[in-house]
Amino acid sequence: MTIALTVVVLVAVVIVAAQLAERLGIQPPLFLLGVGVIACLVPGVPVIELSPEVVLLGLLPPLLYAAALSTSLVDIRANLGSILSLAFGLVLFTALIVGAITHYVLDVHWGVAIALGAIVAPPDAVAATAVARRVGLPRRVTTILEGESLLNDATSLVTLRTALAAAGLAVAHGEGAATHPEPVGPADVAQSFAVAVVGGVAVGVVVFLLVGWLRRRVHESAADTALSFVAPFAAYLPAEEIGASGVLAVVTAGLLLAHKAPLLQTASSRLSERINWASITFILENLVFLLIGLQVKAIITAVREDDVALGNAFLLGLAVLVAAMIARPLWLLPMTWLRRVVGRDEQAADNTSTLVVSWAGMRGVVTLAAALTLPQNTPHRPVFILVALMVTVGTLVLQGLTLPTVARRLGVRGPDAREDALQEATVVQATTAAGLRAIESRTEVDTSTFELIQRQATARVNRVWERLGSGRDDEETPSETYQRIRLEMLAAERTELLRIRDEDSVDQAVLRTVLQQLDAEEAALAYRVSRHERLRDEVLTTPSQVAGNCDHLREDQGFAVPTTPEGCEECRALGMTWVHLRLCTTCGHVGCCDSSQGRHASAHFHESAHPVMRSLEPGESWRWCFVDEVLG
């Protein structure tokens, strides 16, 4: 009963504190960390010990798997050089620097000293994802941070095991600690890394193939989601059992399953999995930071019993914190320069993005969990745990709180919502056109049915295009009008449905099915309504990721003098209202967009065969080829 009550209280605190942090404008991880520190100092609050087994076996696999599911394998491949440099090179570099400081201050075995370096070296996947996404960093920066934090835990834990083995110790998984019977040399180190990396990836691939095979035969959303809950543990446990990296196994399985999800899962299964994992991630991510804060009092009490003075332990913690923070730019800046200048790597980050990445080194639960795995006979074990806690809290506070300011001062900002809409519009238009082409030659589809499908498809494309443009505060776009009216209708339909339910005149299973259909439609509409634009002063140009290779765009001059700069001449003559304006770059004709009633820009193309138009909206300079249907 006590354990159950404790879990309920912890989850309740997480929910309330996270919502309060959102309202106060504070990052929930940092707020929950502070709540935990304050709670552990209150008399009467029970001491909650965070055992390494709970973290490494209970929290780490699902958190890593959830992070991998939301990370793009394509983006990881595109930035693999930067990610590997951080996940392997930087971890070892930091471990050596911290190890040298620890060896000098405490005069301990080099293996023990480097073990502390391995503990504090890796930024945490949870912390990096939670902070980077809330700060609103560019997607490439966020991808590098996520990729680094997904892979660097494997380097850290393998380095930790190897360093302790060199010192004659073994990582504790129970009460005791075994002594390593043989000395560890360079060949042993290389072998450990090879087994960890190759074995971890191999186990991850096997789990991916097994889960994929099962998913092709499981068609119920509930069963498929339950299978996804098993996947991280099915990867982590066997990998650790054979001496490989459980972290790499989980990450490999998660990335591959996410990449192949559209082929392996049904749409309802993907939706169910996304919703359930979002709930689990919310609880575990925030719970982790609350538990870290609750450890403070117990750790300080343990340090008082060590032969190192508490003041000296704090000084060591500060020195290691500074070293861990400085090691990151010391590694990143020259490595990025070498890749960009010497290696001629066009994917290497620019200087401002590199500086932001160098300041995004927040540590988290893995650092503290790794410290707790130290054998009980490790010299100055309580001091090492205190240092790990100081580095975790210090980086979360110093870097987590100041990262938004650093990014803003350097001019590094997240993706523009208008650019996202522009890219989304081209993708939706291309996929919708492919769908229409697939059925236009079907003889069993009558004309009225095809026209209905075509209108719905066109409306879906126009909804995205309407997110562009300056807009007018006093007028709605057609899609906004539809969404508002349809939401009002759904509310009325639900009210009537509940009245019928209360009369008990219809089977409840039938009513539940209808209610679920209403909920699905309302959720889709509410999602579109909630996507507010973040307009900026910069000119919106064509994103390089979707700029098409088109002869018309290449030969186009790019601009023409508008014949009617005040607006669409045809709309004004007919008394219509346009949504957005388009300019023919050949003759200067100004017409309304396809979301407008007249669709005069497209009509002008069909009449004149002038292939290219550009946006005439303020702050937009992108072009569109009607012939090839590409941006440029």
Image: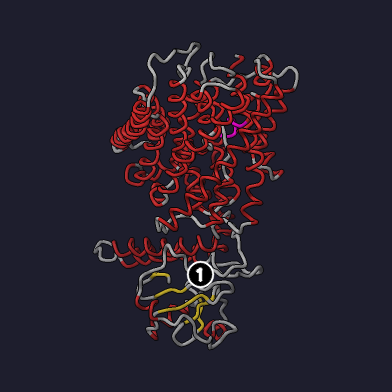
At x 62% / y 27%, what residue is drawn? 387
- Nearest the viewer among 425 and 442 is 425
Foreground residue, 430 or 542? 542
Magenta-colored span: 284-289
Q: Which image quarter holds the C terminus? A: bottom left
Q: Quadrant of the N terminus?
A: top right
Badge 1: how crowded within 10 Å, few (<14), some, or many (20+)? Answer: some
Is 285 included in the stretch rendered in magenta? yes
x and y, in percent, of residue 348 in the image: 45, 55
The amino acid on which the numbered mark 1 sits, given as a three-letter code, is Thr
The overriding secondary structure of the stretch rendered in magenta is helix
Residue 425: x and y, percent? 45, 63
Residue 607 colored in magenta in the image: no
Most foreground residue, 486 or 147: 147
Q: Is 482 placed left or right of 154 in the picture?
A: right
Q: Quadrant of residue 428?
A: bottom left
What percent of the width, then of the height, locates residue 475? 63, 69
Q: Residue at x 54, y 35 (%)?
A: 97
Q: What is the count of numbered marks? A: 1
Q: Is residue 440 visible?
A: yes
Secondary structure of the residue carrying numbered label 1: loop
The residue under the point 35% across, 76% down is 627
Residue farthest top in this picture: 176
Given the current orientation, which residue lies at the most extreme left position? Answer: 443
**Which residue has dot 1 on it?**
541
Q: Is 590 drawn above or below residue 283 in the view shown?
A: below
Q: Can you tell which quarter of the image residue 228 is in? A: top left
